Amino acid sequence: MTERATARGAAWGRPASRGPASGRTAPGGIAEVASVTQRLAVLLSGGVAPASAWQHVAASTSSAVPRVVVAGGMAHADSLADAAQETRGLERGAWLGLAAAWSVASSAGAPLAPSLRSYAASLRSLAETQRDARVALAAPVATARMVLGLPVVGVLFGLALGFDTMTTLFATPVGWGCLAVGGALMLGALRWNRRLVRAVQPKDPAPGLACDLMAIAMSGGSSPDRARVLVDDAVERFALTADPGSLDEVLDLSQRAGVPAAELLRAEAEELRREARATAQEQAAALSVRLMLPLGLCVLPAFMVLGVVPLLVAVVSSTVGSF
């Protein structure tokens, strides 16, 4: 094992439940990346050297990523991209976005602190979007989970009435058929619910990232062509998802109007974040209606098959047996 891999393993092996200096539980995920980015910006604006800033942040956060960056001993953007591979989902994309912002600012000679503040604001907006989505999803998801228990309630109701529905389900051909059909319906409802919930989760870790990176590059005095090259290289280098469509429109507007592009780019990035947040809220609100589909097409039929049909069979069997 190389020295770099050993250092990285040691850093990730440390407990991450509490920050050593803060003594409190950290938020984790996108919010944690935003917190680390903001702290870096504050330290750098106070005159702290980048290497020292990373060391201070690593000692005050529960996230293992800054500790891996400090232990890596490489250029910060490369070390951060390497550490981000230990995370997943939106959090990985957020760390890679931070690495891209750091790389573009360093290459363009742009001030790091303002650049990181801008990216931290982007991440906080995404974290708020995630919180809004969780709040909006809480009621429909809880309702869906409760309704999934209806078939079990039907079986228990039959037992409470004194009918041996369990024997009917597990010891008769009719019961076996009910179990097969009801189980398939319940499994389909569960997978359908999960797919619906996943579909409304935010997927872009940093909406407007291309505009943010372009604004960072141009704030360092780079020409539009040079800035575009830096942004494209960073997007490709860190395997980011960044839509260049809005970027091209803003640059064209800036050129035609003869105004600096940096502020237009930041405004466009903010607008894209607002649109992403509104879209996430709309999708979460619509989920409560969509969840009625698996309820009506899978859960309620499963309730009939597992709860009502065995009860009717048990009633008929006990009635016939009494004559």
Image (cartoon, helix red, strand yellow):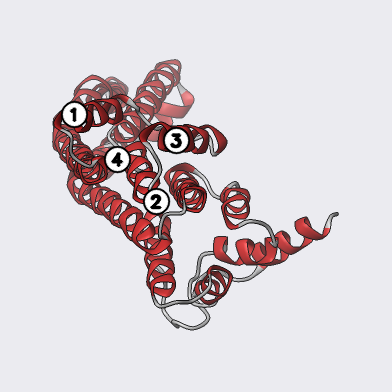
Q: Earlier in the sequence, mark 2 or mark 3?
A: 2
Front: mark 1 or 4? 1
Whole-percent x and y of residue 26?
41, 69
**Label 4, label 3: how far apart the Cα atoms are:** 60 Å
Amino acid type of the residue that numbered disc 4 sits on in the rendered structure: Gly
Of mark 2 and mark 4, the one earlier in the sequence is: 4
Q: Position of residue 158 (x, y in %)?
A: 27, 37
Q: Is residue 207 left or right of residue 51?
A: left
Q: Dot 2: what SS?
A: loop
Q: CA distance from mark 1 to mark 2?
A: 20 Å
Query: Is residue 161 in view from this perspective?
Result: no
Query: Alpha-carbon neighbours of circle 4 within 10 Å: few (<14), some, or many (≥20)?
Result: few
Closest to the observer: 272 or 166?
A: 272
In the rendered structure, find residue 226 and report the number of the disc placed on it: 3
- As displayed, is residue 174 above or below residue 110? above
Residue 16 image-quadrant placement: bottom right
Amino acid type at image mark 2: Gly
Report, in whole angstroms, how far the alpha carbon at label 1 lies from the one at label 4: 56 Å
> CA gap, disc 1 to disc 3?
18 Å
Q: On residue 149, which mark appears?
A: 4
Q: Tell me the quarter of the picture where residue 258 sits.
A: top left
* Labelled pair 1, 2 in contact (Cβ < 8 Å): no
